[in-house]
């Protein structure tokens, strides 16, 4: 088995300090044969990296100085294993994967300890035909004890599997077939709670050409519901949704959402909304709409603000941060993607030349109180431009701490770059700081794929010219 660096450690991990941060960089790893990699958890001062190399699966252990100290090959089934998800837990990590047998595709789970020793294994379900299987999507509960897998069959049936990761058992299996489902048009989001219950949210009649009112159709199923499929609707009145993100609040046992709505022009958001739906008392639910303030829209849109057609455009709701009191923080980002013909560019499948431009610019955070009133809102400026990279180096990572939030991002997408952060208080006040410079360090940081390891620590993958480095930032 090929080691990444020699026993003499001729090239050691780099450690440097900038202002209040300590940055530690690992040795480079060649990714030429890798399909994917996963940054796993940290246990007893060591964190793990899993490399999926199609025919082999290897785990690498790193110490606090980001030096590789061991590696181990994992043995999965030899019948064409394909990893579906990798889940880190309190006492190790689990791998969910499929394999083929008797013309069927089976789902199996392996559980490993922090030294990557196999401690338990179970085949939990048959998930389809072996040939041309529908792809499986996965979700993990907030406490990382439950795994939800789902796939679309025959363009109309949603097959779901809920799995207990502690006992490696199938909690339930369900085929959901809503009436008149057009998956690409209607499907909004799938959720799972800490008890293994699922929530499937469908976005219905979100088009001005329809005569019926826009609403969300929610299906729920699981042990807390007596394994009875339940359905309820959330009416949006005369408003249409521009973009939305749902989340399940396990502490307060409620479905919540934050989004942007439009009154007339479907390409422009004119306001934001907050949704709270308590499962125990649905009649106590709240849906509050709020028109965007012109000052806020101007700060977010900049020179693209249109005084005649007010609002914001080309914006995505990235995530919902849950507050303990039942409120939420909604984070949005301006995203523009353009594909254009360019002489001398690449050829596509029909012979045209094209290039794809990615612009990921300013962020906003809107904080809603549990009663639907506005707590605070603010805009956080950044500008990121790249081409033909699927924006892998753009966007941000959110680091949550008990006292504040941190937004880390690349100032610009280039080989020589400055990394900055916003440190945001619970009341929306913030400071902007420089974290590090990548000049002469051969780093290209993928913040949107970073993993928070502790309240004051994040690990960011860096990919440059087929080489992976792992960067630990400690605040």
Image (tube, rainbow, N blue to C red):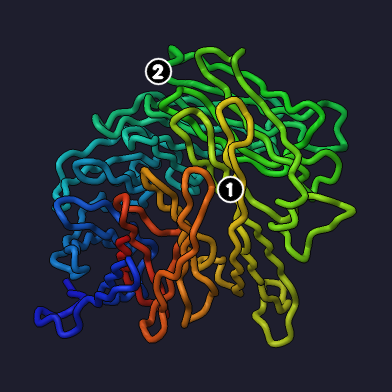
Of badges 2 and 1, nearer the viewer stands 1
Visible residue check, residue 65: yes
In the picture, which quadrant includes the C terminus?
bottom left
Q: Residue 23: x, y in percent?
A: 30, 70
Left or right of 85 on screen, residue 422: right
Q: Is mark 2 on a helix, strand or loop?
A: helix
Query: Is residue 461 depicted above or below 119 in this figure?
Result: below
Residue under the image location 49 percent in, 21 percent down: 221
Residue placed most toward the observer, 457 or 233: 457
Which residue is depicted at the point 18% across and 50% down?
43
User: In terms of secondary structure, where does tag 1 sit?
Assistant: strand
Residue 158 appears left or right of 271:
left
> Which label's residue is closer to the chain start, 2 or 1?
2
Please name the residue shown 20% across and 53% down the image. Answer: 75
Q: Point out which mark residue 223 bears.
A: 2
| Residue holding disc 1 | 365
Assign the N terminus to one quadrant of the image: bottom left
**In the foreground, 453 or 7:** 453
Can I make out residue 154 in this image? no
Q: Is residue 148 above or below residue 332?
A: above
Nearer to me, 374 or 127: 374
- Please provide percent x and percent y for residue 328: 53, 36
Which residue corresponds to the image point at 70% horizontal and 58% vertical from the top-left? 299
Q: Where is residue 128 in the image (x, y as percent from the top left)?
A: 45, 38
Q: Distance between the residues labelled 2 and 1?
A: 35 Å
Q: Residues within 10 Å of mark 2 (few under 14, many from 20)?
A: few
Question: Image height check: is 400 above or below 407?
Answer: above
């Amino acid at each position: 088995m090929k080691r990444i660096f020699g026993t003499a450690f001729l090239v050691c991990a780099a450690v440097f300090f900038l202002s209040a941060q300590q940055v530690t960089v690992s040795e480079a790893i060649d990714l030429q044969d890798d399909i994917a990699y996963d940054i796993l958890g940290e246990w007893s001062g060591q964190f793990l990296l899993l490399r999926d190399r199609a025919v082999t699966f290897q785990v690498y252990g790193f110490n606090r100085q980001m030096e590789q100290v061991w590696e181990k090959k994992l043995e999965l089934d030899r019948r064409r294993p394909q990893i579906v998800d990798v889940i880190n837990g309190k006492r190790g990590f689990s791998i969910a994967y499929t394999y083929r047998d008797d013309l069927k595709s089976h789902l199996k789970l392996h559980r490993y300890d922090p030294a990557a020793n196999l401690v338990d294994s179970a085949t939990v379900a048959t998930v389809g035909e072996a040939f041309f299987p529908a792809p499986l999507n996965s979700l993990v509960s907030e406490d990382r004890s439950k795994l939800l897998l789902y796939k679309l069959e025959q363009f109309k049936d949603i097959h779901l599997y809920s799995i207990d990761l502690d006992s490696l058992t199938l909690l339930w299996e369900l085929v959901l077939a809503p009436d008149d489902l057009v998956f690409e048009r209607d499907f909004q989001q799938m959720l799972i709670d800490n008890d293994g219950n699922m929530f499937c949210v469908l976005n219905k009649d979100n088009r001005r050409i329809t005569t019926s009112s826009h609403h969300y159709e929610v299906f729920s199923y699981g042990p807390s519901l007596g394994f009875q499929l339940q359905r309820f609707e959330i009416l949006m009145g005369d408003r249409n949704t521009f973009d939305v993100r749902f989340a399940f609040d396990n502490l307060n046992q409620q479905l919540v959402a934050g989004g942007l709505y439009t009154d007339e022009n479907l390409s422009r958001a004119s306001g934001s909304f907050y949704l709270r739906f308590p499962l125990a008392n649905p009649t106590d639910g709240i849906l509050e709409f709020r028109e965007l303030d012109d000052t806020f829209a101007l700060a977010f849109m900049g020179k693209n603000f249109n005084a005649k057609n007010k609002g914001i455009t080309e914006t995505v709701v990235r995530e919902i941060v849950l507050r303990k009191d039942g409120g939420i923080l909604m984070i949005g980002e301006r995203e523009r993607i353009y594909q254009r013909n360019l002489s001398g560019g690449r050829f596509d499948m029909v012979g045209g030349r094209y290039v794809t431009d990615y612009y990921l610019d300013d962020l906003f955070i809107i904080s809603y109180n549990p009663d639907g009133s506005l707590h605070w809102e603010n805009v956080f400026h950044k500008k990121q431009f790249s081409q033909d990279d699927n924006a892998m180096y753009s966007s941000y990572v959110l680091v949550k701490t008990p006292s504040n939030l941190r937004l880390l991002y690349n100032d610009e997408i280039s080989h020589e770059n400055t990394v900055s952060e916003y440190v945001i208080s619970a009341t929306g006040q913030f400071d902007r700081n420089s974290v590090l410079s990548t000049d002469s360090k051969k780093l290209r940081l993928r913040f949107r794929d970073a993993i928070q390891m502790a309240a004051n620590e994040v690990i960011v993958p860096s990919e440059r010219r087929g080489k992976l480095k792992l960067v630990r930032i400690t605040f």
